[in-house]
Image: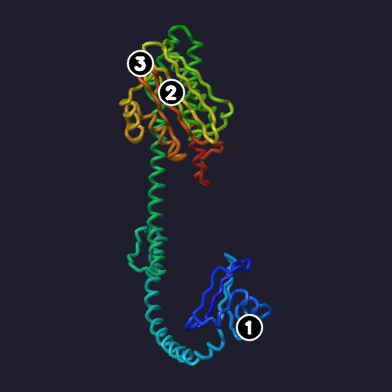
Amino acid sequence: EQNCGMVVLDADGRVICSSDTFENNNTRYRLNSKKLLSLIDGAEWDNDTCGNTEGYSVVKKESSVTGWTVYVYEPRKLVLRSANSMITMIVVAFVVAVAGAAAASIFTTGFITRRINKLKNSMAKVENGDFDAVINTQDKDEIGDLIHSFNSMTTQIKNLITQVYEGRISQKESEMRALRAQINPHFLYNTLDNIVWLIEGNEPDEAVEMVVTLSEFFRLVLSKGKEFITIRQEEQHISSYLQIQEKRYHDILDYHIYIDPEIYEYQIPKLTLQPLVENALYHGIKYKRSRGMIEITGTKEGENLYLTVADDGVGMDEDELKKLGKEISRPCKETESGFGLANVNERIRMYFGAEFGMKIWSEKGSGTRITIEIPAITDNPEKPEAGKQSTRSEEAENEAEK
C-alpha cells in the first residue's frame, strides 16, 4: 500500500531488507531498524498489532521456519487522510462482493457438486472391481487435480494387479520348468541302467550306494514343496548329482566342492547350482578329449553370496557366448543349452531383483565360469497364507514327501 514502510529482521535482530512507499520519497516518516525497535520496545501488542508507538501503527509477523520477523509500519496521520476514500472503497467493495458471492455460490456449488458426485460414483465402481472407471476432465483446479490423481491411482492399481497376477503365473511356470528340467527322464534312465549294470556285474554294494544317492537327489529336488533351501542342502544336492554322474563318467570327470561352511545356513532357491553343474558336464567336460575338472565354490562378500561353477572344458567363443546370453534373456523359450541357465537366472531376478543374477565368462579351449550373485538371507522368503491355505500347503508337503 501507499505510505507504508517495512523492515525485515533475522533471528539475531539484523536487518535483512527494508522498503517504504511514502509519497515523493518522503523520508520524514521513514523508520530505520534501530528507531523502529526503540518505538516498539515496551509497547503493548494486541496479538501482532500495536497502535501506541508515537504516531505509528505497527504490524509484525514472525516466521516459524526462518526465525525472521517482518515489521510493517504506517503513520496514523497518513491513515486518517485516506480514511474517507478507503471507507467508500470498502462499502463499494462489500456490496460488489456480496452480490458476486451470491452469484458465484449458486454457480460453483452446482459445478463442484456435479464433479464430486461423478468422482464418488467412479470410486464405487473401483470398489466393486471395475478399474476401467476413468473420469475424463480437462479441469485444472483442486477437484480436477483430485480426479487426475484418482485416474492415475486406478491405472496404477490395475497395472499392479496385472503384474502380480502375471508374476505369480510366471513364478509357477518357472518352478514347473525347473522341476521338469531337473527330473530329466534321460538322467533317471541312465542312472537306473547303471544300477542294473552294477547288480549284473556282481557289485551290489555300489548299486545300493547309487540307489541311496539317487534317493537323496530326488528328496532334495522335492524339498517338501519348498522353493527355498539352505546352502548346505544345495551342496548336498549337487554332491548327490555329481556322485551319480561320476559313476557313469568316471573316466572323464573330476570335481571339487569348496563352499565356505560359514554360509551353510543362508537361504537359496533350490535347483540353483545343479543346472550349472549339468551344463558344465554336458557342454564343457563331455566334449573334451581328456579328463575335465568341475569346481564349485561359494563365499560371502559384504551382504551378498557368490556361488561359482567353473570347468576346464571346451569353452565357448565370442559368438557362442553371445548366443547363450540371448537364450538366457528369453527364459520362456526352451533351448538346447540355455534352458536350465535361463530358468535359474529368471528365478533369481524374480525373487531378489534385476541387480542379481548370473555372470558368464568363457574362452574357447580354456573352459567356462558362471558366477551367481544373490543377497545373503537367513529367513525363508516364502510366507504361507493362513487358514485353509496353510492346511493345503501341509497336504502338498505330505504328498511331495511321499
The residue that mark 1 highlights is: 53
Residue at figure coordinates x 54%, y 30% from the top left: 300
Residue 341, image x, y percentages: 39, 29
- Name the secondary structure under disc 3: loop
**Horizontally, is 155 left or right of 65 in the view?**
left
Label 3: few (<14), some (14–19) or many (≥20) C-alpha neighbours in 10 Å: some
**What separation in Å lies between label 2 and label 3 (alpha carbons)?**
15 Å
Residue 59, image x, y percentages: 58, 79
The residue that mark 2 highlights is: 277
Which residue in the rendered view is the most extreme toward the right? 42
From the viewer's perspective, is residue 255 above or below residue 127? above
Q: Earlier in the sequence, mark 3 or mark 1?
A: 1
Residue at figure coordinates x 59%, y 71% from the top left: 69
- The amino acid type found where label 1 is placed reads Thr
Residue 121, image x, y percentages: 39, 67
Residue at figure coordinates x 56%, y 29% from the top left: 263
- Name the secondary structure under disc 1: loop
State the image quarter where residue 47 is shown. Answer: bottom right
- The amino acid type found where label 2 is placed reads Val
The disc placed on residue 287 is 3
**What separation in Å lies between label 2 and label 1 (alpha carbons)?**
91 Å
Q: Nearer the viewer, mark 3 or mark 1?
A: 1
- The amino acid type found where label 3 is placed reads Tyr
**What separation in Å lies between label 3 and label 1 (alpha carbons)?**
102 Å
